[in-house]
Amino acid sequence: MVQEYKISEFSHLVGLSPYTLRYYERENLIIPHRYDNGQRYYTDHDIRWVGFLLHLKGCGMSMNEIKEYVTLRSQGDETIPQRQALLQKVKANSLSKIAEMQFHLKILSHKIDWYDGKLNNHDEGDFAAYLSRFEEEDKNEK
């Protein structure tokens, strides 16, 4: 038997407000089932689908890209190459953003360490000089 969820239950299960679910519906990202009286309901399949949409969003996929993906998906298996290319592009962008964030975190960590040295009465010089030591180490590692 298929489990059916009203919008309030479903919103709790997927972590989105009913307002956001209605927005996703207007944007054709989700299509709720309807009872004879017109009331929406969702199933476990819909939970998995919204979960996947949230993964796409979490990877930095824009709303337009998500809409494109959903449109391609609705057209069937002949669009698998286009969907795959879109996901590859999003993956590459995500990896680039991760690398950039890792770089920023590395500099931030060095700044924290530099402050630690200052607080422990070690004269570390100015931050640029301190940082240059690590830049030299990075060059040697490559």
Image (cartoon, grey):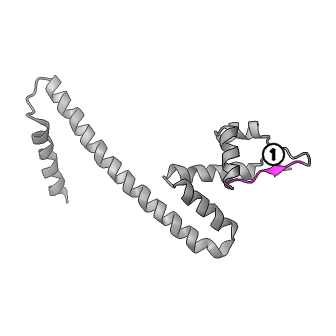
Quadrant position of residue 116: top left
As rendered, which of 55 and 40 lies closer to the eye?
40
The answer, for residue 84, to whether it is visible in the render is: yes
Q: Which residue is mark 1?
A: 40
Report helix, strand or loop for mark 1: strand
Q: Count the numbered circles shown.
A: 1
Question: In percent of the image, x 69 and y 51: which residue is there?
Answer: 26
Q: What span is in magenta?
A: 29-35
The answer, for residue 48, to whether it is visible in the render is: no
Q: Is residue 83 above or below residue 109?
A: below
Q: In the visual, does 32 lie left or right of 138?
A: right
Residue 33 lies in the magenta-colored region: yes
Question: In percent of the image, x 17 and y 33: which residue is there?
Answer: 114
Q: Identity of the amino acid at label 1?
A: Arg
Which residue of the protein is positioned furthest toward the right in this rendering?
Answer: 36
Q: Residue 123: image x %, image y %?
A: 7, 29
Q: Is residue 65 above or below residue 124?
A: below
Q: Residue 8: image x %, image y %?
A: 75, 36
Q: Residue 100: image x %, image y %?
A: 33, 51
Residue 80 lies in the magenta-colored region: no
